[in-house]
Image (cartoon, rainbow, N blue to C red):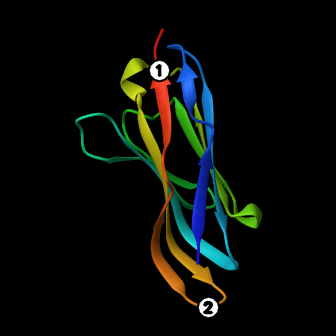
Amino acid sequence: QVQLVESGGGLVQPGGSLRLSCAASGSIYSINTMGWYRQAPGKERELVAQSTGGANAWYADSAKGRFTISRDNAKNTVYLQMNSLKPEDTAVYYCNFRGVLTSTDTHPEVWGQGTLVTVST
């Protein structure tokens, strides 16, 4: 069984920074795609950033230039460095892993439990 544990959310003032982490537990051989989604109150969940490994990363327009996704494959962990945060970045952030190969099977998709990021004075 694969579980994702997120950390790093919290309250930050506009213009501040936060770093989110998401680590996968289990006997994992490889993870194809690691990404971060967010869901603001009253809105649909949206993809913020995604990494397929190496230098390949995709960002939503709202995240470009401010957020950086990175991954440590040895630790089965993905990070999201968020700088110059704005009130509109307030949301619950979820990590998402796709194509998780373990010692027993392949998990098409696994979600984290979500971590709240609040950007406010």
Quarter placement of the N terminus: bottom right
Query: What kind of residue is marked 2?
Result: Thr
Q: Nearer the viewer, residue 26 or 57?
A: 26
Q: Which residue appears at 50% of the width and 13% of the height? A: 14
Q: Secondary structure at mark 2?
A: loop
The residue that mark 2 highlights is 104
Kindly report the distance in space between the C-alpha atoms of the residues bearing marks 1 and 2.
Answer: 41 Å
The answer to which of marks 1 and 2 sits earlier in the sequence is 2
* Residue 61 location (% of width, % of height): 36, 36
Q: Local crowd at mark 2 within 10 Å, few (<14), some, or many (≥20)?
A: few
Q: Which residue appears at 40% of the width and 19% of the height? A: 87
Q: Quadrant of residue 4?
A: bottom right
The residue that mark 1 highlights is 119
Does residue 5 appear left or right of residue 62 in this picture? right
* Residue 53 location (% of width, % of height): 60, 63
Q: Nearer the viewer, residue 24 or 85?
A: 24
